[in-house]
Amino acid sequence: MHDSSGELDRIISSMIEVTARKHAEDALRESEARFRHLADSAPAFIWLTDEKGDLTFVNRHFEHVFGRSAELIVPDGWRDLIHLEDMSSFVVEFARSLRAKRPFRSEVRVLDKSGQVRWLRADAVRRLDDVGHFLGYAVHYSVQQGSAESSSPQAQWWGPNEHLERAWRRPRFSSRRPV
């Protein structure tokens, strides 16, 4: 501030302690980096969607099998991977599951980077926050080599997925301890 002659008389300042916020931001970045490393190291296809069903993450295994980077698949480049005859039923069933916020299971034919047709089975489980709000889906894909003429491998696959359905039905436990 200046006095009546225009000379600097005093300075007013304020400071806000941001150490805790900076530590929290660092911890979040580290947690996200651990998740990406884990997901990208997994020899499996992993997708994440948001609560609207929009694709937000795919791991690097997609690039290994399909020859396309995550940047080319997210948010809707995945549509180029699915056989045209399977697309509408996949989209309809996914939309139905999303509206009901229930697990999703489907299988589609895809073309890998070598030009081979494969069956891809999607098993999607709901992602919930600590209070049970729906955040989207975590989707795991299983691949089995096949031909366009081969019948669906559905009968071989459905049994192993029962553990996912039982898991999402289990009650969620609070981190708070009973008094």
Image: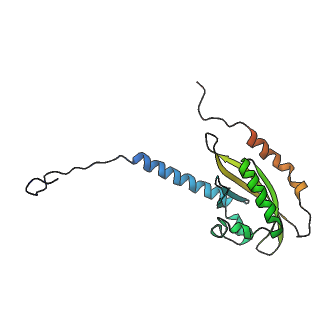
- Using the rendered view, name the quadrant where residue 2 is placed: bottom left
| Residue 120 visible in the picture | no
How many numbered discs? 0
- Using the rendered view, name the quadrant where residue 7 is placed: bottom left
Give the residue furthest to the left: 5
The residue located at (57%, 56%) in the rendering is: 33
Towards the viewer: 38 or 106: 106
Towards the viewer: 148 or 102: 102
Give the residue furthest to the top: 179
Question: Which quarter shows the C terminus?
Answer: top right
The residue located at (13%, 52%) in the rendering is: 9
Towards the viewer: 130 or 92: 92
* Colour treatment of the image: rainbow
**x and y percentages locating residue 100 in the rendered image:** 73, 47
Query: Is 85 drawn above or below residue 101 in the view shown?
Result: below
Towards the viewer: 48 or 95: 95
Query: Is 70 drawn above or below residue 177 in the view shown?
Result: below
Position of residue 122 in the picture relative to residue 18 (left or right): right
| Residue 152 visible in the picture | yes
**x and y percentages locating residue 59 in the rendered image:** 67, 61
Give the residue furthest to the bottom: 115
**x and y percentages locating residue 98 in the rendered image:** 72, 52
The residue located at (87%, 67%) in the rendering is: 146
- Using the rendered view, name the quadrant where residue 44 is placed: bottom right
**x and y percentages locating residue 76 in the rendered image:** 67, 66
The residue located at (74%, 38%) in the rendering is: 170
